Image (cartoon, rainbow, N blue to C red):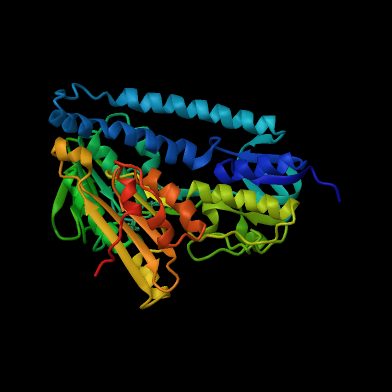
Amino acid sequence: MSFDYDLLVIGAGSGGVRASRMAAARGAKVAVVENRYLGGTCVNVGCVPKKLFVYASEYAAKFEEAAGFGIKGAIEHFDWSTLRDNKTNEISRLNGIYKKLLENSGVTILNGTAHISGPNSVTIGDQTYTADKILIATGGWPDRPDIPGAEYGITSNEAFYLEDFPQRVAVIGGGYIAVEFAGIFNGLGADTHLLYRGEQILRGFDQDVRSFAATQIAHKGVNIHTHTDVVRIDRLADDSLRCQLNNGATLDVDCVMFATGRRPQTDGLELGELGIQTRDNGTVVVDPFFRTSVPSIYALGDVIGTPQLTPVALAQAMKLVAQWYSDDQTPMSYDNIPTAVFCQPNIGTVGLTEEEANKRFAGDITVFESSFRPMKHTISGMPERTYMKLIVQTSSDKVLGAHMVGEEAGEIIQGLAVAIKAGATKAVFDSTIGIHPTAAEEFVTMRSPRS
Ligand code: NDP
C-alpha cells in the first residue's frame, strides 16, 4: 500500500521537530502537523522565555550585591513591556529558525488541528493524509484546579504575555513552574506569595535540597505559605483578586497564577475511538519502542508521561529514529537525568536523592555535604548560602547522586552528570583537581562523610 507520507508527526514541539528532521535525514518522506506555534512549549511558553525572564529578575539583586564592592546604584525603572516584547521578538526569531530547519530538512509543515482518523490516516479539516507511521508528539498544557473563580487566574502560558506587570502575585503550586515564576515575579519587584498545599515545596527533590532551597528563596523575599491552598477567588471592585485560603484567611493580589501541573494534550485526537490506551491522567501508554497500542501509531515527549523535560523529548526522538532506521533495539534510559530549577539561587540535580538511595541501597549509603557562603557574598553582605551534596554507594564507592543549591547550579551539575553517567566513583571525584576559587571545586574536595 502506498501512503502520502512515511511519517506524519502531530505536534511541532521539541520532540516532534527532532523526530521529523532526523527521520527526513534518513530519507523518509515526512510531514509535521501544527496548529499553534513551531517549537512547542519550550520555545514559546516554557524554557526559553522563562530563562529570559529569569535573567531579567536577577538584576535587582545584583545592584544590591554591588554596594559592598563600592558600586552604588539602583534600578530606576523597570519597563515590563520592553522585557515582554523583546522576549516575544526573540521567540518569533526562533519560530523562524524552526521553520527553516524543517523546510531545509525536506519536512512538509501542515498547519491545522490533526484528528487521527485511522491507524494510517490523519485528518486536518476536510483533508485526509495517509502515512505508514503516525507519531503523536502533542505535549502538555497547563492544568488548573476546579475552584470557584479559577477563571480569574492565569497559567504560565498567559504569564508570558501579561498586559501589565502585577504588583502583588499569588503563585499556586510547589513544583518547577511555581518556584521559578515566584522567583521571576519577586525579582522583578512584585510582592510575591507562593502557596503550596503540602509540607515542603519541590516534592520529589532531595529533602535537604528542598528545605535549603526554601530557606534561600524566602531570604530572597518570596513569601512561602505551606499547607495552604486557594479554595475560591473573587474579583473585587478595584479589580484586585481575593484568594480565599483553606485556613480561613484571605490574600488580595493583582494576579493569581496556577502552576498546578500540566496535562497531556490529546483533545481532538480521538485516541479512545482508535483504541489507543491511555492512563487515568490521560498520558498515552507506549512500549519501549514508543509504540502505542495501535502498532502504526507512536508517541513521545510530555504526552507519554515520562519526565516533562525538553532534553528528554529530544533524546526520545533520537532513540526512536535510531530504533527505526539503525540497528539500535535498546530502550531509552531514564537514569541519571540531570535537571535544574531556575529559582534564586538555582537548584541543580542528577541521580538519586538520599531518600531514593536509601530505599534502593539501604545501609550502603554514605553522604557528603557542604554548606558555605559563596566568596562573592563575603563582601556583598547578602545572606545567600550554597549547598552541595553527594550520595555515594559505600560498597562500590560509586557516586549515585549530586545535588546543589547555589548560583549556577544548573551549569555546574551538567558536567557532574557526565561523570555520574560514566559511573565515576568518589575516589575519582577526590582525585580530580579543583578549579580555584570556584564553588564547583567543593564537589571534589568533600572529604568527610556526614556523621
Ligand atoms: P509539577 O508537577 O512539577 O508541580 C505541580 C505542583 O502543583 C505540585 O507542587 C503539586 O503539589 C501542585 N498541585 C497539583 N494539583 C494541585 C491542586 N489541585 N491544588 C493545589 N496544588 C496543586 O508541575 P509544574 O506545572 O510545576 O511543571 C510541569 C513539568 O514541567 C515539571 O514536572 C517539569 O518536568 C517541567 N518543567 C521543567 C522545568 C525545568 O526543567 N527547569 C521548568 C518548568 C517545568 P504536590 O506536590 O502536592 O503534588
Q: x, y percentage for residue 381?
A: 13, 38
Say left or right for 443 vs 68. Answer: right
Ligand 1 shows up in the quarter that is bottom left
At 17% across and 46% down in the image, what residue appears?
A: 219
| Relative height, residue 52 to residue 416 (above, below) | above
Say left or right for 221 vs 197. Answer: left
At 24% across and 33% down in the image, what residue appears?
A: 188
Q: Name the outermost residue toward the bottom.
A: 363
Q: x, y percentage for residue 231?
A: 24, 57
Say left or right for 90 vs 106. Answer: left
Q: x, y percentage for residue 350?
A: 42, 56
Q: x, y percentage for residue 442?
A: 31, 51
Residue 402: quarter of image: bottom left
Q: Is residue 308 visible?
A: no
Residue 23: quarter of image: top right
Say left or right for 54 vs 335. Answer: left
29 or 238, nearer to the observer: 29
189 or 128, nearer to the observer: 189
451 or 301, nearer to the observer: 451
Residue 439: quarter of image: top left
The quadrant of the rendering that contains the C terminus is bottom left
Exactly how many numbered labels are in the figure? Answer: 0
At 24% across and 25% down in the image, what residue appears?
A: 78
Q: Name the outermost residue toward the right.
A: 1
Q: Is residue 102 visible?
A: yes
